[in-house]
Amino acid sequence: MAKLIIQGGTPLRGLVRAGGRKNSAVAVLPAALLCDSPSVLESLPAIDDVAVYGDILQHLGCKVSASSVAPGCNGAVTIDPGGLQPAEIPYELTKRLRASYYLLGVMLARHGAAQVPLPGGCDIGLRPIDQHLKGLRALGAEVNIEHGVVNARAACLTGTSIYLDVVSVGATINIMLAATLAQGTTVIENAAREPHIVDLANYLNAAGARVQGAGTDVIRIRGVNRLNGCVHAIIPDEIEAATYMIAAASTGGDVQVNNVIPKHLDPVIAKLQEAGAEVTEEGDRLRVRMSGRPRAVNVKTLPYPGFPTDAQQPMTVLLSLAEGTSIVTESIWESRFKHVDELKRMGTNIRVEGHTAIIEGVDRLTGAPVTASDLRAGAALMVAALAAHGETVISGIELVDRGYESVTSKLKGMGANVRREQ
């Protein structure tokens, strides 16, 4: 288990660059298997989830290598699906990330069969895949679960209309992937609208697919016979950017976050400004400055374009230091307040009632030994440690590695006193 040791109480100052979007990367990587020729994926983040996906693709017979096609491009990797073979993926790999279930749609489309163990990922509440299976069955697949493995078969996938009972990012993506090579037209209604769904659609269309409506709640996919590999750059990660923006405000700092799409951060910007931070935009850069104590605000997480659930836990830290009472309502996941007990060890005054956290702001936090329970909880503890007086030791920091690249060096670049120990 890795530990991050932070001497807090120093305002963050300087520049930091957000990497490629985690949720885009883990959707586009399996999508590359739909192609008949290699793809070059640029700006892939150097995170554990991407590394695990690379191992999965190689297990399936694909070649994954650093790219010489786009020299100097951050994180460029070539995916050659030429040796792709249908095979059951080891549970030791799939349990390490949630997005392994995208291989259901991909392998059905390419080989008419898929064997994928039920996925792992962060424990943030019930995360059923019933909408995924509903969509794949509607396309003509036979799907059953035996001994923890999802087995799917289809002689031929056929386009149809699919209405998702709940807005599901994962199900929207899985159905898109399967429908790309299906016969006829597939219509996904009540589809998720997140930016990484648009990013995936842009990749698929560049490879020869016919996807329309991504970014709206109705997506149409006209099946094609084949896809060709292409070059595609992953969009910036707005959750990584949001975390550093919130950290700047929590420490009373002045930080410029580069490589962002400001529109994707509108709800975070709005809440930071409401809390008293000064946020200025210049092209693909955002600068966050905070002087004085934050003001209390209320936050409710919602599907995009609402306030992102992945930024809720770091935002809770900022509100713990605010003057007054804040209310945070988590409407996406029922177990996303696991970080609160650890934050209480650092002096916060938070009461959780069901899906709501009532936060009474305190003057200061103090360092303490804490443990990350999931990816974003780890990010929240990291923000709290930066703002706290004294030393904080965060155990389980390898969970943060799943979604944040080079976190120690990036924090040091903003003046943080931080070191990592195994």
Image: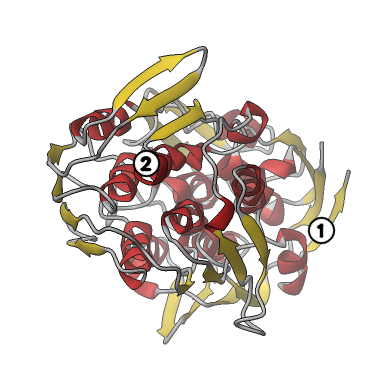
Q: Is residue 256 above or below residue 137?
A: below
Q: Amino acid at mark 1?
A: Val
In front of the other: 40 or 358 = 40
Q: Residue at x 28, y 64 (%)?
A: 209
Mark 2 lies on a secondary structure that is helix
In front of the other: 257 or 231 = 231
Q: Residues within 10 Å of mark 2 (few under 14, many from 20)?
A: many
Q: Is residue 64 shown left or right of residue 334?
A: right
Q: Residue at x 65, y 37 (%)?
A: 347
Q: Amino acid at mark 2?
A: Gly
Q: Is residue 228 shown left or right of residue 96?
A: left
Foreground disc of the pair 2, 1: 2
Kindly check if marks 2 and 1 are in contact, taking CB atoms under 8 A apart as contact: no
Residue 241 in percent (x, y) is at: 52, 65
Question: What whole-number distance in Å separates the C-alpha atoms at marks 2 and 1?
Answer: 42 Å
Q: Quadrant of the N terminus?
A: top right
Count the labels in the image: 2
Mark 1 lies on a secondary structure that is strand
Q: Which residue is mark 1?
A: 418
Q: Quadrant of the C terminus?
A: top right
Q: Is residue 46 shown left or right of residue 25?
A: right
Residue lying furthest right in this view?
421
Q: Which mark is residue 105?
A: 2
The part of the image, by quadrant, that contains residue 408 is bottom right
Q: Can you see residue 290?
A: no
